[in-house]
Image (cartoon, grey):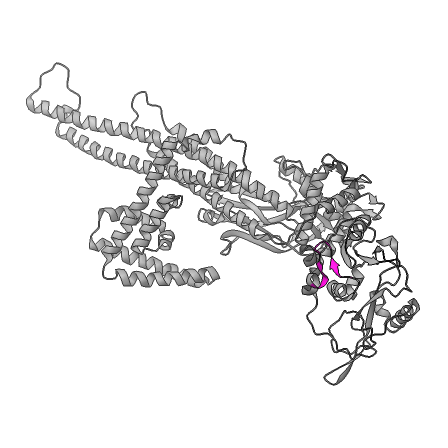
C-alpha cells in the first residue's frame, strides 16, 4: 500500500496524468483504493509473468475480493455502505463482461497503471531531493510558529510518504543484495570444496601450475564480487538509516504542526462553543482533516518501525575494517519511533463533544470521546472501555504534576460512566457516546467557597495494548460547575465563561486571572451572544455594556484598550442601575433571546437595536420621522424589552414616548411580538432598517386564520357550536396622559381555563375595531380598570397574564 499512499500525495499535472491513465483504461480508481495492498503485492509478480494463466488467476482473485467486499457492505446497510455496495456491484458486472474472455488485457491494464504511478512518484521524489526539502526538516522543526497552514502540513505529509517509500525501496535493495551475497557465498563454498588448495590466497613470488593459477584467478573474482556486494550493502544500510532519521524528524515536525498546533487550536475553539449543544459543521470538518494528518503520521511511524526491525536483524553481519556499526543508531531510532507512537496515541484520544459545563445533580448528561487514529489503531491493538470520573481541582493539579490520584471517586461518582469504543461509519472514527451519565453525589463545598464558583473536571480514561505494550490514554474535559437547582445557572455560567476565555492554556489547576482587559471582555460578550442568538453585538452595543461595567466613564471619550474589568465586578457586585450583578443581567437577556425564536430572528435581521441607553434612544428617534420606533433592552427591568417611538406632542413638536417594557409575562400572554407591533398604529417605521413594520415583521406573524369580526362579547361559532373565547387585553400606554385617547390595545384570547370549552381556538392579537364590531374602545382609564377587574374576577388563574395599564418611567 506504500505506492498508493505516495500516489495520493501527488499534486498538479502528476495527479492529472495518473487519473487520465485510469480513465483511459476504464479501470475504476475506487477498486485501486479499496484493494491497494493486495494489488501492489501482485504487481511485482505481474511485471515478470504476463502469461494467460497468471492473468486468469489475477482476474478470478480480484473478482472474488470484490464479491466479498460487496457482501460485507450489504450486511452493514448504512447510507454510505449502501452507496458503496451499489457501485461495487456495478464494478463486478463491468469486470465480468470486459475481462471474462480477455484476462490478459486486465493484467496489462493493471501493470501499466501501477508503472505510471511508480514513475510519477519517483519523479516527485527526485524533485524533492533537488529542492532539498526533506533535508530541511531539522531546521524547520525549530520553528516556533506552530500555527501552520493546511498546505504546509500537506506538504510535510507528502514528503514523509515519499521518504518512507524510499526507505522501503532501500530495504528491498538490501534484501536483493543479501540474496546476491548468499548466491555468491554458495558458489564460494562450492569452489573451495572443489579446489581445497585455494582456501588461502596465493603466496607472493611462489610459482603454481597453470590450472592452479586459473583457480586462484577464479577465487579472486568471486572474492571481489562478494566484497563489492558487501560494500554496496553497507552503503544501502547507511542510506536507509539516514532515511529513518529523516522520517523521525519529519514525524516530529508533523506532530509539532498538527498536535501542538492544529489540534491545540481546535481545542481552544471548542471552549468558545461551550454553550452550543452540537459542534458546528466547520468545527467537525476541521477535526476530520486533523484526523487524516494523524493517520498519516501513524502510517509513517508503523511502517518505519517494521523496516527498522527488519534492517536491525540483518545489518552489521559483514562489517569491513574501520566500519562503524549501524545497529546502535537503529536502536536510538527505534526508541524515538516508540516515543512518537506513544505520544500520538495519547494526544489523539480527545473529547469530541464536551460534557455540559453546567451539570445539575441527578440529571442526565452526555459526552463523546474518540481516537483520531482509532480506525488504523484497531488493526494494531485492542480498544478497551472508556471510563469517566469527576475530579476536583486538587486532583487535576495532581494529574498535571504526573501523580495519578489514588481515589478517583473522592470528589463524586458518575453513574453509567463506562462503555466500549465502537466504529462510527458516519464519521469513520472509533468513538464512544456516553449518553446517560449522571452525577450521583458530589463533594461538598468548604469554607466560604460558593457552589457556583467550585469547578470540577471530568476525566475520560482508556487503555490501548500495542504489541504487548499498554498505553494509558486520558483526556480532561473543560471545567464544569455542578449545581443543585436551576437558579444557580446564571452565576455558574459566569464562572464558566470567565474560565473559558481568560484562563492560560498552561495553567495549574483551574487558575484564572482576577481581572481582564476590556477588549478581551468585549470579545467574550460578543462571541457568547453570537453563539446563542445567531448574530453578534454592534460597536454601540459594546460601548453601552462598557459603560455599565466600567462605571460612569463615557466610552466614546475614554480609551478602553487599557481598561480592566475585575471578576468581582463582573459577577458579584450588584450594579446600582440593574440592582443585580452585570453578568446576571446580561445572561438573562441572552437567555430570553435564545429561548424565543421570534426574537432571535428579529435580532439577526437587524430590526433590534438592543443595548443602548434611554438617552441615546431618545437622541436617535428625535432625528427620525414620526412613527419611527426601535426595540431595546430595558436597563432597569430584568429580562424585558422596551419599545420607544417618535410621536407628535400637543404643540405639534416631536416627542419620544417610552411605554412600559415587555417582560416574560407579556410574551406568554401575547401570541407574537410582531403581531402586536403591526397592530399598533403609532408604530410605522422600524429603526435602524428604515423600512415599514409590515415589511420587517410580517414574516413573523401567525399564519392561522383570524377570528371572524362578528364576535360579540367573546362568543364565536364553529361548526354550529358556540365557543366561549375569553379575551385578554394588553394595554400599551403610549404617553403619560391617559385621558388623551392615545392608548392602544392588543387583544388576545386567554389561555384555556376550566370555564372555557374544550375546543381549541387559535390565539389572535390585533388592534380593536373602533367601529364597535369587535371591541368597544375605552374612553377613560376607569373603563379599563372595570374591564380588568371583571376579567380578574372571572378568571383569577389568568390574572398574571394581564398587561400593565400604568405608566412607570422607572423601569425603562
Q: Where residue 694 sits in the image (x, y, percent)?
A: 71, 64
Is 374 part of what is drawn in magenta? no
Q: Is 754 rendered above or below residue 420?
A: below
Task: Judge by depth and name the residue closer to the eye, 812 or 64.
Answer: 812
Q: Where residue 793 sits in the image (x, y, percent)?
A: 89, 72
Residue at 69 percent across and 44 percent down: it is 524
- Please indicate whether residue 440 sits to the left or right of residue 225 in the image: right
Task: Judge by depth and name the residue closer to the eye, 367 or 305.
Answer: 367
- Classify residue 561 by image quadrant: top right
Q: Is residue 686 visible?
A: yes
Q: Where residue 516 sits in the image (x, y, percent)?
A: 72, 37
Q: Is residue 449 visible?
A: no
Q: Which segment is the magenta one? A: 683-694
- Classify residue 643 by image quadrant: bottom right
Is 689 part of what is drawn in magenta? yes
Task: Judge by depth and name the residue closer to the eye, 200 or 222.
Answer: 222
Amino acid at each position: 500500500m506504500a505506492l498508493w499512499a505516495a500516489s495520493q500525495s501527488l499534486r498538479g499535472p502528476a495527479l492529472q496524468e495518473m487519473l487520465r491513465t485510469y480513465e483511459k483504461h476504464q479501470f475504476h480508481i475506487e477498486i485501486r483504493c479499496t484493494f491497494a495492498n493486495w494489488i501492489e503485492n501482485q504487481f511485482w509478480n505481474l511485471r515478470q509473468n504476463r502469461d494467460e494463466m497468471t492473468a486468469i488467476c489475477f482476474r478470478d482473485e480480484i473478482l472474488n475480493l470484490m464479491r466479498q467486499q460487496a457482501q460485507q457492505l450489504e450486511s452493514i446497510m448504512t447510507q454510505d455502505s449502501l452507496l458503496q455496495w451499489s457501485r461495487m456491484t456495478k464494478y463486478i458486472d463491468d469486470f465480468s463482461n470486459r475481462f471474462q474472455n480477455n484476462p490478459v488485457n486486465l493484467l496489462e491494464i493493471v501493470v501499466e497503471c501501477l508503472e505510471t504511478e511508480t514513475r510519477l512518484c519517483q519523479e516527485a521524489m527526485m524533485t524533492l531531493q533537488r529542492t532539498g526539502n526533506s533535508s530541511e526538516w531539522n531546521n524547520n522543526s525549530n520553528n516556533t510558529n506552530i500555527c501552520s497552514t493546511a498546505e504546509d502540513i500537506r506538504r510535510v505529509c507528502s514528503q514523509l510518504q515519499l521518504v518512507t517509500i524510499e526507505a522501503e525501496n532501500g530495504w528491498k535493495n538490501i534484501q536483493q543484495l543479501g540474496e546476491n551475497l548468499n548466491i555468491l557465498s554458495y558458489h564460494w563454498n562450492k569452489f573451495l570444496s572443489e579446489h581445497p588448495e585455494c582456501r588461502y590466497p596465493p603466496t607472493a613470488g611462489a610459482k603454481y601450475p597453470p590450472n592452479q593459477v586459473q583457480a586462484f584467478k577464479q577465487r579472486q573474482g568471486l572474492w571481489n564480487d562478494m566484497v563489492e556486494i558487501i560494500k554496496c550493502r553497507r552503503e544501502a544500510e547507511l542510506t536507509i538509516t539516514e532515511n529513518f532519521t529523516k522520517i523521525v524528524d519529519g514525524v516530529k515536525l508533523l506532530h509539532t504542526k498538527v498536535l501542538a498546533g492544529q489540534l491545540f487550536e481546535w481545542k481552544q475553539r471548542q471552549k468558545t462553543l461551550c454553550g452550543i449543544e452540537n459542534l458546528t459543521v466547520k468545527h467537525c470538518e476541521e477535526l476530520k482533516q486533523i484526523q487524516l494528518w494523524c493517520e498519516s503520521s501513524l502510517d509513517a511511524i508503523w511502517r518505519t518501525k517494521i523496516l527498522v526491525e527488519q534492517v536491525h536483524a540483518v545489518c552489521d553481519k559483514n562489517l569491513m575494517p574501520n566500519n562503524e556499526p549501524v545497529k546502535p543508531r537503529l536502536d536510538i531510532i527505534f526508541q524515538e519511533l516508540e516515543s512518537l507512537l506513544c505520544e500520538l496515541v495519547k494526544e489523539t484520544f480527545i473529547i469530541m463533544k464536551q460534557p455540559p459545563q453546567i451539570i445539575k445533580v441527578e440529571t442526565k448528561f452526555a459526552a463523546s470521546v474518540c481516537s483520531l487514529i482509532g480506525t488504523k489503531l484497531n488493526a494494531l491493538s485492542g480498544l478497551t472501555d472508556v471510563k469517566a470520573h469527576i475530579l476536583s481541582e486538587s486532583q487535576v493539579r495532581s494529574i498535571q504534576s504526573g501523580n495519578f490520584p489514588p481515589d478517583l471517586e473522592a470528589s463524586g461518582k458518575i453513574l453509567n460512566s463506562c462503555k466500549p469504543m465502537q466504529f462510527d461509519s458516519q464519521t469513520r472514527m472509533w468513538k464512544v457516546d456516553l449518553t446517560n451519565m449522571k452525577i450521583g453525589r458530589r463533594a461538598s463545598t468548604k469554607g466560604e467557597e460558593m457552589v457556583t464558583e467550585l469547578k470540577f473536571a471530568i476525566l475520560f480514561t482508556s487503555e490501548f495494548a500495542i504489541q504487548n505494550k499498554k498505553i494509558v490514554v486520558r483526556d480532561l474535559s473543560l471545567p464544569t460547575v455542578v449545581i443543585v437547582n436551576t437558579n444557580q445557572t446564571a452565576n455558574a455560567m459566569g464562572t464558566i465563561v470567565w474560565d473559558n476565555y481568560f484562563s492560560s492554556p498552561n495553567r495549574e489547576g483551574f487558575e484564572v486571572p482576577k481581572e481582564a482587559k476590556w477588549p478581551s471582555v468585549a470579545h467574550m460578550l460578543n462571541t457568547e451572544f453570537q453563539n446563542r442568538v445567531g448574530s453578534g453585538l454592534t460597536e454601540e452595543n459594546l460601548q453601552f455594556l462598557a459603560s455599565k461595567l466600567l462605571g460612569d466613564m463615557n466610552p466614546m471619550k475614554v480609551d478602553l484598550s487599557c481598561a480592566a474589568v475585575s471578576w468581582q465586578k463582573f459577577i458579584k457586585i450588584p450594579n446600582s442601575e440593574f440592582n443585580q450583578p452585570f453578568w446576571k443581567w446580561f445572561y438573562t437577556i441572552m437567555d430570553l433571546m435564545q429561548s424565543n425564536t421570534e426574537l432571535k430572528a428579529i435580532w439577526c435581521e437587524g430590526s433590534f437595536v438592543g443595548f443602548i441607553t434611554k438617552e441615546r434612544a431618545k437622541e436617535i428617534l428625535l432625528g427620525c420621522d414620526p412613527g419611527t420606533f426601535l426595540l431595546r433592552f430595558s436597563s432597569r427591568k430584568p429580562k424585558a424589552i422596551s419599545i420607544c417611538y417618535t410621536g407628535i406632542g400637543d404643540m405639534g413638536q416631536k416627542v419620544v414616548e417610552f411605554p412600559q417594557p415587555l417582560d416574560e409575562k407579556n410574551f406568554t400572554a401575547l401570541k407574537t411580538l410582531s403581531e402586536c407591533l403591526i397592530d399598533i398604529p403609532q408604530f410605522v417605521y422600524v429603526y435602524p432598517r428604515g423600512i415599514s413594520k409590515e415589511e420587517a415583521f410580517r414574516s413573523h406573524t401567525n399564519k392561522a386564520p383570524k377570528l371572524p369580526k362578528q364576535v360579540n362579547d367573546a362568543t364565536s361559532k364553529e361548526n354550529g357550536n358556540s365557543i366561549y373565547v375569553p379575551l385578554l387585553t394588553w394595554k400599551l400606554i403610549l404617553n403619560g396622559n391617559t385621558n388623551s385617547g392615545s392608548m392602544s390595545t392588543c387583544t388576545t384570547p386567554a389561555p384555556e381555563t376550566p370555564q372555557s370549552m374544550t375546543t381549541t381556538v387559535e390565539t389572535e392579537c390585533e388592534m380593536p375595531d373602533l367601529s364597535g364590531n369587535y371591541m368597544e374602545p375605552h374612553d377613560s382609564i376607569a373603563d379599563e380598570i372595570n374591564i380588568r377587574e371583571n376579567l380578574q374576577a372571572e378568571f383569577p388563574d389568568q390574572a398574571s397574564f394581564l398587561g400593565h395599564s400604568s405608566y412607570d418611567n422607572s423601569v425603562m
